[in-house]
Amino acid sequence: MKIEENKVASIDYTLTNDHGEVLDSSSGREPLAYLHGNGGLIPGLEKELEGKVKGDKLVAIIAPDQAYGVRSEELVQEIPLENFQDASEVKIGAQFQVQNGDHTHIATITTIGDKSATVDMNHPLADETLHFDVEIMDVREPTKEELEHGHVHGAGGHHH
Ligand code: ZN
């Protein structure tokens, strides 16, 4: 069975940046399972995995615009300190999720002033060219429920 829209693929992967530093890996964990064509992975990686079968191995080099985006200064914003629910969370380097329309951003506090904090909503991997070393561990049909939810349940997927 080939990886194509609405098939569940399980992959072992190691993600490195341009300097060869490991950013993420499924090593020591269950393979990552996702529902192909539903935005579960970055677009560039889904494109590379299209048509692959169990046992295939590949190295995919993904440019920022097909990965976590190009840095945008518009995503760097000043937030009044009073807008934070919990003052103890206002620390340089603290990260939290921000809902912006359909998108969930990971925001990182970069500076703190007297009245406001600077928050960077660029993805931590924005501007990075990503190198994925991937092995396809399994390809299967989704369950009816997975198809309805648009994501994988159980091992390697969502738990709810
Ligand atoms: Zn679900």
Image (cartoon, helix red, strand yellow):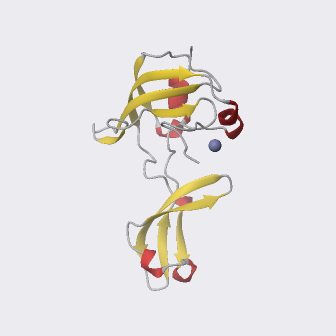
Quadrant where ligand 1 appears: top right
The residue positioned 48% from the left and 37% from the top of the image is 156
Q: Position of residue 110 (x, y in %)?
A: 41, 68
Q: Position of residue 128 (x, y in %)?
A: 41, 43
Q: Is residue 32 left or right of residue 17?
A: right
Q: Is 105 left, or right, of 132 in this rendering?
A: right
Quadrant of the rendered structure where residue 16 is?
top left
Q: Quadrant of the N terminus?
A: top right
Q: Quick one: which residue is furthest to the left in this view?
A: 20
Q: Residue at x 40, y 36 (%)?
A: 130
Left of 61 or right of it: where is 99? right
Q: Is residue 64 above or below residue 96?
A: above
Relative horizontal placement of residue 93, taking residue 81 as reference (left or right):
left
Residue 4 point in image, percent of width and height: 61, 21
**Residue 36 or 138: which is nearer the viewer?**
138
Residue visible at 68% across and 36% down in the picture: 145
Q: Residue at x 57, y 22 (%)?
A: 140
Residue sitting nearer the eye, 42 or 110? 42
Is residue 45 placed above or below 104 in the rendered structure?
A: above
How many numbered marks have been drawn onto this rendered protein structure?
Answer: 0
The x, y position of residue 81, in whole percent, is 51, 81
The single residue placed furthest to the bottom in the displayed view is 114
